[in-house]
Each structure stands twice: as C-alpha cells, then as structure tokens.
Amino acid sequence: MPIHARKNFYQGVNAHLHSYFQQEGGWESFHAAHIVHLLEAIQELLPDGYRAFAEKSLQLSFFDPDTGEIDKAHIKPDVSIWTERLSPVFAVPHGLGLSSPLEVMTLDETLVEPQYLRSVVIVHGDGFGRYKPVTRIELLAPANKPPGTHASQYRVSRAETLLSGINLVEIDYLHERRFPVERVPSYPDHALGSLPYNFLVSLGELGDRQGQVLRYGCAVYERLPAIPVPLITGTLNLGLDDVYKRTFGSNPAYGEDIVDYAEPPLGIETYSDADQARIRACMALAAQQSSV
C-alpha cells in the first residue's frame, strides 16, 4: 500500500523526490521554486546598500525538463527557411470589407520565450541604478554536472565569474552526477570522503587564483548546512535547511503524488551502502507513523 505524506520524513534533502527528478525528470519546477525561496531568504538578511535579484543562470541555455539536458538549438528556431514556402499559402487578408491590421508579425515573434534556469545575484550600489555584482548563487542542474552535455561550458562560465572578482555559491542536490569541480570527491565513483549533496562557497579575487573555496556537504537524512554567503565585507548566514523545507512544502505534489515511502526511491543502487541504510530507516519511520 502506498505511503504518501505532505510531510518530508527525511531530514534535509528528500532522497525519494530527488531520485525521481534524476530518473524521470521534473527538476526544472523544483529549481524555479527553490531559487525564489533562496532569493526571499537572502533579501531578508541583506544589510543596507545591497540588493538581490533573480536572473539568468550561468547555466544559460534552454532546459528540457523531460531529459534534464540543456539544448541551445531550441532557443531560437530559424523560421526564415519556411518563409518562402508559407507565404503563398497565407497572404495578409485585405479587401472584402476587412479592416487593415495594425501590424503583421511572424509566428516566432508571438511564441512564448523558452524558460531559462535562474540564479540569485547579490549586488551592491548607491540605490540610483548603479550596482556592482558581488555574489552569485547557483543551483546546479543535471546537464551542467559531468558527464552532462554542458558541463564543460559551465566550468568555463564559473571560472570567468570567479576571475572577474565575483563570489560564487554553488548548491548541489543531485547525487547521480559528479560535482563540476574535480577536487570535490565524486559520490557516483564512491570516492573517499564523498557526499551526495555538496555546497561550495568560492571567494572571487580579481585576477587572483588564491581566493578561498569553502566546501560543505551532507549525507542522506542529515540536516542541510548553514553556509556563509560572502558580501564585500562580512557574510550572510544562509540556513539551507529552512529554505529547502519551504520549497518541499510549497508543492503538495511532491509529498502526496511523487514520493511513495512504501517503495525504495528510483535508482536506490546509486546511493552508498550507508545512505541506502538511511533511506530504508526513513521508509520504516514513515510506515510506522502512517499506521498510527
């Protein structure tokens, strides 16, 4: 019998839900909601002179929620190759008592723009539109983690960001692919000291490769860490656990439709033995509490 619950029975990341995202798709919806909640949490902490905005991610291209991949080819279709073929079929109507159109547009101009991954950017300025970017917060997507199709592109973008003097915070809830930074022990390869969920805080130094990089992480069924978000001077204390709880609880579909604690998560074999034991303990807890 299925066991569904609005409550997240896991401490920290819900392994059932995130396994579903990686095996079946649907990550983009969670990504969009979590970025909004991260933005709101950060805005509450910012001192005077700072602002935070959601903008296009370093992971810039079109995201396919069905495959978890990114495909630039879908961003702007080349409709010019169809113009000659289509124009004789449908000419602009005139006469017969019809009014003249105010404007003639191509179909491409009226289609909804593709959805982009978003990130949070903290800026500092004088309040008159003159802002300098200080820190980016990126929530990693499947295609930007090796061996994803745009992992190399993401590495280049992150390097350019850091070497331009902008700090970078990277949040990774996706255990099935390696973190883009090779120094982070690879969980899929069972590397010593590896963890399924990783968080990097990199301090950008203009033209200087000696800026510090702080690594945080947690296992399955562990609370998410509180991490520092660097500003020009000082840091913010961002409690990821509270933000994650808000995102999970914001969508009833996560707990009531997708997650079934009566069955192991899809791809349970991709977890370490220790994390598989934690998953089964969580399933047992859910079964016990649901029977009360």
Image (spheres, rainbow, N blue to C red):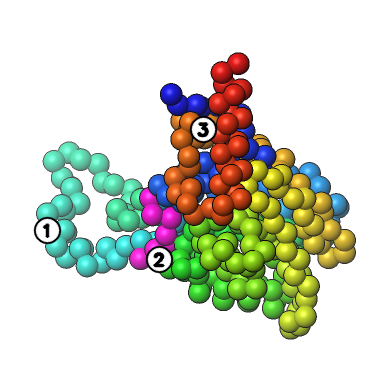
SS category of the residue bearing label 1: loop
Residue matched to label 1: 88
Range of residues picked out in magenta:
66-73
At x 47%, y 51%, the residue is 269
Residue type at mark 3 is Tyr
Quick one: 10 or 69, which is closer to the camera?
Answer: 10
Residue type at mark 2 is Lys
Of pointers 1 and 3, the one earlier in the residue sequence: 1
Q: Nearer the viewer, mark 2 or mark 3?
A: 3
Residue type at mark 1 is Pro
Quick one: 121 or 286, which is closer to the camera?
Answer: 286
Apparent side of residue 272 relative to residue 214 in the rendered image (left or right)? left
Marks 2 and 1, how far apart in space? 31 Å
**Residue 1 versus residue 71 in the image, above or below:** above
Residue matched to label 3: 261
Q: Nearer the viewer, mark 1 or mark 3?
A: 3
Residue matched to label 2: 72
Residue 10 seen from this side: yes
Q: Quadrant of the C terminus?
A: top right
Q: Residues within 10 Å of mark 3 (few under 14, many from 20)?
A: many
Apparent side of residue 106 relative to residue 27 in the rendered image (left or right)? left
